[in-house]
Image (spheres, rainbow, N blue to C red):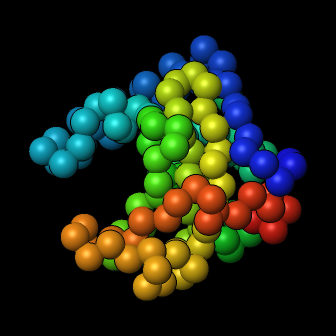
C-alpha cells in the first residue's frame, strides 16, 4: 500500500456480511448507546481492516478487535470523509486505531495511530474528555502498521 489514503469498495456479499454482523451486535448491545446503522458501519470498517491486513475470509465473521502477530488493531469509523478520530479514555495504549471513513460500500482508510501516540495534550479536548486527532496527524505508512 502507498503512503496515502486508500479507498476500498466492499463486494455485495461483504456488505451483506457487515449488515448481518452489525444487526447481531445491535440486538446484543445497550441500544440507548448505539444504533443499528453505527454497528453496521463499524462491521464494514472491520471488514475493510481485515482485507487490508490480508486476514479476511469471505464467509467468516470478523472480530471486534483484531490481534494479529501480537499487535492489536481496532477499526474506528465515521461516515464523514473529513471527520476527526476520537480516542477514548478506555482505549488501551498499545492498540493501533485504524480510522476508516465514508459510506458503505466505498470506504476510505484515512490512516492509523497508536492510542499512546494520540493521548497527548495537544489532542486532548476538555469538553468531551477525549483526544481528538485530525486526519492529517494519522500515519499512512502501512508497512510500519503491519
Q: Is residue 61 visible?
A: no
Instruction: Give percent across and percent down for residue 134.
Output: 52, 60
Residue drawn where x is 51% and y is 43% of the image: 82
Instruction: Give percent across and percent down for residue 112.
Output: 63, 61
| Left or right of 6 in this view: 93 | left
Residue drawn where x is 25% and y is 36% of the image: 35
Q: Quadrant of residue 48?
A: top right
Q: Is residue 55 above or below residue 43?
A: below
Instruction: Give percent across and percent down for residue 127.
Output: 22, 70
Q: Nearer the viewer, residue 90 or 117?
A: 117
Q: Is residue 48 above or below residue 66?
A: above
Q: Is residue 96 above or below residue 85?
A: below
Q: Is residue 100 visible?
A: yes
Q: Is residue 73 above or below residue 4?
A: below
Residue drawn where x is 33% and y is 30% of the image: 37
Residue drawn where x is 36% and y is 38% of the image: 39
Q: Nearer the viewer, residue 81 or 107?
A: 81
Amino acid at each position: 500500500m502507498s503512503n496515502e489514503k486508500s479507498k476500498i469498495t466492499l463486494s455485495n456479499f461483504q456488505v451483506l456480511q457487515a449488515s448481518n454482523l452489525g444487526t447481531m451486535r445491535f440486538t446484543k448491545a445497550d441500544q440507548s448507546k448505539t444504533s443499528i446503522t453505527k454497528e453496521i458501519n463499524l462491521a464494514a470498517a472491520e471488514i475493510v481492516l481485515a482485507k487490508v491486513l490480508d486476514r479476511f475470509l469471505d464467509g467468516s465473521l470478523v472480530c471486534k478487535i483484531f490481534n494479529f502477530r501480537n499487535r492489536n488493531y481496532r477499526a474506528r469509523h465515521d461516515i464523514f470523509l473529513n471527520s476527526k478520530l476520537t480516542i477514548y479514555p478506555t482505549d488501551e495504549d498499545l492498540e493501533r486505531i485504524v480510522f476508516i471513513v465514508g459510506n458503505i460500500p466505498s470506504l476510505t482508510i484515512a490512516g492509523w495511530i497508536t492510542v499512546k501516540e494520540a493521548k497527548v495534550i495537544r489532542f486532548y479536548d476538555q469538553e468531551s474528555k477525549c483526544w481528538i486527532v485530525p486526519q492529517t496527524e494519522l500515519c499512512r505508512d502501512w508497512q510500519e502498521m503491519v
